Amino acid sequence: MMAWPCSWCPVLFVTSYLAILSTPINAGVSDNFKTVDHGHISIPEGLPRLQDTDSVLSETGRHPSIPVTAKFKDPNLHPEHYPYYFTHHPEEAAICRQDDDCLHKDALDKRACWGYEVGCYRQNLTAYPHCFKHNPGWARSIEAQQDIFWNQTDFGYLKNMREGHTQLCIPKTQAAKYFSGLFTTNAFLPSPNLVFNLTQLHPHSTYQRYKALDSGYVSGDCSMNHDILEQYSQHKGDLQSWVKELGNISEISTGTREKLQSQCDVVLDKPTFLMKLDAGVNMYHHFCDFVNLYLSQVYNQSYSSDIYIIMWDTSGMFYGDFFSETWQAFSDHPIIPLRDMAGKTVCLQDGVFSTLPRMPRGFFYNMPMVPDCSGSSFMHAFSQHVVHRLGIIQQGPVRDKLRITFLDRNSSFRNVINQKELIDELKKNTGYDVKVVVYNLKELTFVQQLKITHNSDIFISMHGAGLTHLLFLPDWAVIFELSNCEDERCYLDLARLRGVHYTTWQKQHLLQKHNEAPHPSLGTPHAKFCDYSFNKEEFVRLVDEAAQHVRSHPKFIPKNIHDEL
């Protein structure tokens, strides 16, 4: 993918990748670390260490600083994520240890880390990107190439965010230290630290969805460093940065704090994420929104779903969201369009300017990627998080059957003319369970679509945003982009991010274009604006090749019927 020079992204800490509206996160981690060896993993002194809770247990097995009646509040994470959660939240680990009803005691002593934490090194990680070929143009060795990929696309991205920040908005009071880009779960301030005066917002009079509020209509409990902000002002794209919005923040003076508080028509007393959303009708673009929301949460290791999400929308236009069920993986509350609070003064006690979907060097749009490497643990974790929170269960692999899903686009272009012939040929193989699906909300809810995708061993589709479903395939699956329509990198790179095997049609003389139409901008025929037919023998050969990959994957372990019972 094309990349911009390293520069501005959101909010009030400025980093070479990201600026986050916050003081350094208060996770109990000192800025001055000493690495202490604790067996198989090096954990910095100051970073939460699970055995610290053991060393202070009383003879009754209780932690002296935690009430006997304390109960573990389950954050509802994917089972594989609890060891990381307990590493970052030792107090929760202590509560779980002494709570007989805690179901995650097996995760207490694993001391896992993602790699962006201070003192967590490559040898501590359970997974790392794989590079299957050395590309000398990118790196001096294949190991260096892996490191580049990890820093571009994985938890190394967060590590660089943490190490490269510059404070942009300095809190004026101790109470305002959480004037916040990325919130801490235990800080809900009694006074407003972000105030939006929306009395002059008239959404029905504008088509401008991402209009910045005028100076004086947004106030914060911190002192903005406009000199630093100006250094990043070249990136003012609506979905690239929060530069315009942050530039108009005025300070809340001591004398006006109580007055402002008394004027609040709406007080949002839960952590609140502010987001500018990409196209909600396109899965590829909209999932850049969800990935960046998850990125913001992981940055501060806060996964509560008891949060508000404000969609920065100042227009009167309808926002179509075909994937709205996905918000349930992040929030228990309905999304709040900013325009719905027009005419009111809105006070946020803990506000978060989330990272944005089209940031320069962003996640995953505009992301540079070293070639010939695959497997971002971050994207794998995102997939697990969404699948778990939406209650999607893996029912396979199935013994003696490979589950093949063929996505029928059923659209104006890129339909498969001889689709029935191809499917009939596949069904001759008794080892294949072939399903043809149409993914639209008239046929299936989005969660129902994800259930099918997650339970597919091979997923086949023409080029299009529906291929974004590959994010939720099982690890052993193959994504088969039947034709990439001359857009070679888009879903190949997304598959490499997710870490699933990708294949596509290679023998162009064995396909045929039909119903060619001119490109709407270029006025000439284009590979994306036509239908296709494919040679059935070559199609079956490619599916059989994909099947071999699936069956040879180390995680492809078919379940016995007795296991299911």
Image (cartoon, grey):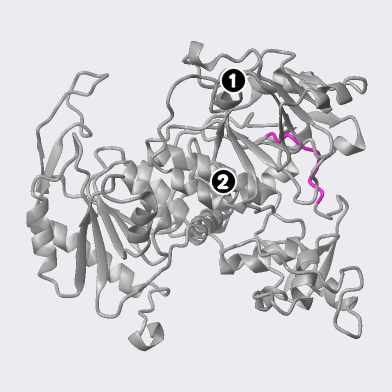
Residue 21 at what x, y percent from top left? Answer: 73, 34
Q: Main secondary structure of the magenta part?
A: loop
Residue at position x 25%, y 59% in the image: 405
Amino acid type of disc 2?
Answer: Gln
Image position of 370 with respect to 434: above or below: above
Q: Secondary structure at mark 2?
A: helix
Q: Which mark is residue 236?
A: 1
Q: Are marks 2 and 1 in contact (CB under 8 Å)?
A: no
**2 or 1: tag closer to the N-terminus:** 2
Q: Nearer the viewer, residue 238 or 450?
A: 450
Is 409 placed left or right of 81 in the picture? left
Is 528 placed left or right of 92 in the picture? left
- Magenta span covers which residues? 19-26
Q: Which mark is residue 152?
A: 2
Quadrant of the rendering where the C terminus is positioned? bottom left
* Disc 2 crowd, CA 10 A, few/some/many (<14, 14-19, 20+): many
Quadrant of the rendering where the N terminus is positioned? top left
Q: Nearer the viewer, residue 251 or 307?
A: 307
Residue 329 at what x, y percent from top left? Answer: 53, 52
* Disc 1 crowd, CA 10 A, few/some/many (<14, 14-19, 20+): some
Q: Secondary structure at mark 1?
A: loop
Residue at position x 18%, y 34% in the image: 412
Amino acid type of disc 1?
Answer: Lys
Q: Nearer the viewer, residue 502 or 205?
A: 205
